[in-house]
Amino acid sequence: MVKITLDMIYQYKSHLISEEKSKATIEKYIHDLLVFYEWLENGLLTKSKALEYKAVLTEKYAPASVNSVLASLNGFFAYNEWFDLKIKNLKIQRKIFCQSERELTKSEYERLLKAARNKKNNRIYLVMQTICSTGIRVSELKFITTDAVQTGRTAVKLKGKIRTILLPKELCRLLKEYIREKNIESGSVFVTKTGKPIDRHGIWKDMKALCESAGVAKEKVFPHNLRHLFARTYYTLQKDIEPFPKK
């Protein structure tokens, strides 16, 4: 039996920060640990208690969600060298075929662009094209800066690694026009009204608002699906940047 304390959880948080884990990852791990801590009686933990918690999770959540929580707990256990407390993940049967009904097609992508153009939402219009023509992650959009648009490339720094992303010429031209229109002098191009880089929720919300007029199912419309489309049609999409909407 071991005893978990709040101090131990926050020491682990400091460790995750030193390991340069992303803010979202750290928040997720600590949230899962705090919920687990509240569930325990006085923080006392045994292997049987850990397995009981796994059973509780299994009754409430989908297997993938359960495994996500178990990953948070196992990371904490490993940090404290409680290797005998580690919990096995639930087995998830992988589907042999891709869920084509959830894939975003090129035609649907073009309809979303048209809907954004009609609504004069130039920000989401260009966000979608930037993701789809570069394969950049939503969390990396903050690296699309005024300097990056000028040079046609950006250095993405995440998790201690640096990679270069090239921006197609036509995309740069459209982004320069957008920068002039919004009077953006420096920093990230895609920002909120308060000047902060747009986040995943903001992009998701803007994309969902296009579904009805674009005639695209809502379950297909989420930022990461644009990266899937990029991966499937990389070479052609480089040449298919949509022209900027005329005023």
Image: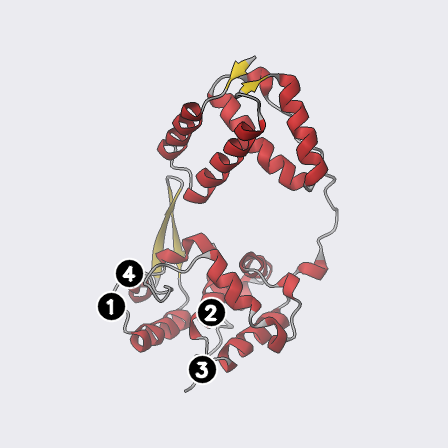
**237 vs 1: above or below:** below
Most distant residue in the front direction = 42
| Residue 245 marker | 3
Q: Do the residues bearing badges 1 and 2 touch, measured as CB atoms within 8 Å?
A: no
| Residue 187 marker | 4
| Residue 88 marker | none
Question: What residue is shown with label 2?
Answer: 124
SS at badge 3: loop
- Left or right of 65 on screen, residue 28: left
Q: Do the residues bearing badges 1 and 4 touch, measured as CB atoms within 8 Å?
A: yes
Between the residue at mark 3 and the residue at mark 4, the CA separation in whole angstroms equals: 24 Å
Closer to the N terminus: mark 3 or mark 4?
Answer: 4
Closer to the N terminus: mark 2 or mark 3?
Answer: 2
Q: Between residues 47 and 90, which one lies in front from this camera angle? A: 47
Q: Quadrant of the C terminus?
A: bottom left
**34 vs 221: above or below:** above
Question: What residue is shown with label 1?
Answer: 185
Q: How many marks?
A: 4
Crowding at mark 1 (Cα within 10 Å: few <14, some 14-19, many 20+): few
Question: Quadrant location of residue 74?
Answer: top right
Closer to the N terminus: mark 1 or mark 3?
Answer: 1
Amino acid under disc 4: Gly
What residue do we see at 58% from left, 29% from top? 39
Q: Do the residues bearing badges 1 and 3 touch, measured as CB atoms within 8 Å?
A: no
Between the residue at mark 1 and the residue at mark 2, the CA separation in whole angstroms equals: 20 Å
Question: Is residue 135 at least partly visible in the picture?
Answer: no
Q: Quadrant of the N terminus?
A: top right
Closer to the N terminus: mark 4 or mark 2?
Answer: 2
Amino acid under disc 3: Pro
What residue do we see at 39% from left, 28% from top? 15
